[in-house]
Amino acid sequence: MPLVRIDMHSPLAGLRPQLSAAIHSSLVDGWGMPADDLFQIFQLHEQGDLFYSRTFPDADRTDIVFISILAYNGYSPEIKQRGAELIVERLAALGIKRDNILISIHENGDGDWLAPSKEN
């Protein structure tokens, strides 16, 4: 059950539905995640609220879209990389510059997710 947080500048607000779909489909296709496993938080920021290097590492950034993924620790490095590459490809297809995307993946384990289930 990945929890995805997207921090970006407010001029991109109108793209939230497309960004959401692109990120989610990338995790479904790249990680083999169930299609109904959708948990995302979008946080909009005014210009000057997000600080980032315009050049590190070997980048040419004009803006930033931070994507933080909190996931259960069971995905191999190759699967995580494949999902991240799909995210970048699909966001680039929406007009987000590849250098403007920064993805971080954080993992946790058993007992770290709490969600009520249906009582039978």
Image (spheres, rainbow, N blue to C red):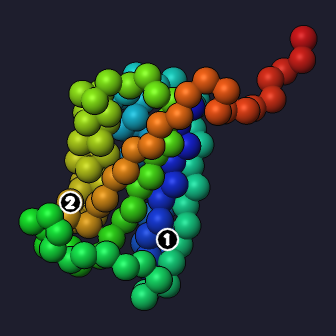
Where does residue 109 sit, x and y in percent of width and height? 55, 28
What quarter of the picture does the C terminus occupy?
Answer: top right
Where does residue 4 sit, x and y in percent of width and height? 51, 48
Position of residue 92 relative to residue 33, above or below, is below
Where does residue 110 sit, x and y in percent of width and height? 61, 23
CA distance separating discs 2 and 1: 18 Å
Amino acid type shown at disc 2: Arg
Q: Quadrant of residue 84?
A: top left
What quarter of the picture does the N terminus occupy?
Answer: top right
The front one of 16 and 61 is 61
- The residue at the point 55 percent across, 67 percent down is 43
Would residue 101 be seen by someone viewing this image from the given angle? yes
Provide the residue designation for mark 1.
13
Provide the residue designation for mark 2.
98
Where does residue 68 sit, x and y in percent of width and height? 44, 52
Position of residue 53 relative to residue 75, above or below, is below
The front one of 117 and 21 is 117
- The residue at the point 28 percent across, 30 percent down is 77
Q: Secondary structure at mark 2?
A: helix
Would residue 18 be seen by someone viewing this image from the given angle? no
Q: Residues within 10 Å of mark 2 (few under 14, many from 20)?
A: some
- The residue at the point 48 percent across, 59 percent down is 6
Q: Quadrant of residue 47?
A: bottom left
- The residue at the point 67 percent across, 27 percent down is 111
Q: Is residue 82 left or right of residue 23?
A: left
